[in-house]
Amino acid sequence: MSEPRPISRFPVPDISELPEDVRQMILTVQEKAGFVPNVFLTLAHRPAEFRAFFAYHDALMLKETGTLTKADREMIVTTTSAKNGCLYCVVAHGALLRIYAKQPLIADQVAVNHLKADITPRQKAMLDFAIKVCLHSQDINDDDYAELRKHGFEDEDIWDIAAITAFFGLSNRMANAISMRPNDEFFLMGRVPRNK
């Protein structure tokens, strides 16, 4: 059997040697998830950037205002991360999408082609806009906003779609640049019933 591949091209610090706040955040995630997602370990290589990254991540992904659901947010990440060729984010956020949406096939569908996915017209409009932000943000115009408003999105929701897409564009590029490897645990999450 071959040795496991490294999770990053850069050094991965020992959790016990990290600043206390970073260490506590990682341990809290481990307690909740049952494992430490590799994004926490790899980004801990630079604690100041780790703090900034997760502060903005949480501001976007954990907010309780607006009409975007947790599944909508993860759908944006999964879809646009696929456009950016980011294996880590497609696998990790695809797992979260399957769990939040309670649909075991949805992440694969939107990662490959959201136009063929089993999603609502509202979600299709959301992803059309997110992909435009991802690939052609310079072409966004009033018609894009009008289309989203027809589906009930408010201006703050539109900001969220753009911000999530832009933030994960950064995340995708860093994950690709450092060869961040997805945890094996993510691949089955939301596909099969959890052991009780």
Image: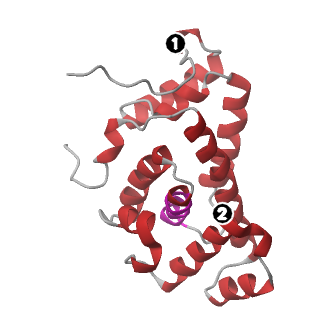
- Give the mark nearest the N terminus, 2 or 1: 1
Depth check: give the residue in front, 59 or 53: 53
Depth check: give the residue in front, 136 or 103: 136
The vertical placement of 193 against 175, above or below, is below
Q: Position of residue 177 (x, y in %)?
A: 60, 36
Q: Residue furthest top?
A: 17
- What is the secondary structure assignment of the residue under circle 2? helix
Q: Quarter of the image containing the N terminus?
A: top left
Q: Is residue 153 magenta?
A: no
Tell me the distance, in whole angstroms, between the alpha carbons under discs 2 and 1.
34 Å
Magenta highlight range: 69-80
Q: Position of residue 63 (x, y in %)?
A: 64, 56
The answer to whether any part of residue 161 appears in the image is: no
Depth check: give the residue in front, 185 or 99: 185
Q: Amino acid at mark 1?
A: Asp
Q: Which residue is mark 1?
A: 14
The answer to whether any part of residue 29 appears in the image is: yes
Residue at coordinates 48% horizontally, 63% vertically from top-left? 71
Quadrant of res 33: top left
Residue at coordinates 54% horizontally, 60% vertically from top-left? 83
Q: Position of residue 40 (x, y in %)?
A: 54, 31
Q: How is the image coloured?
A: secondary structure
Mark number displayed over residue 159: none
Q: Which residue is mark 2?
A: 134
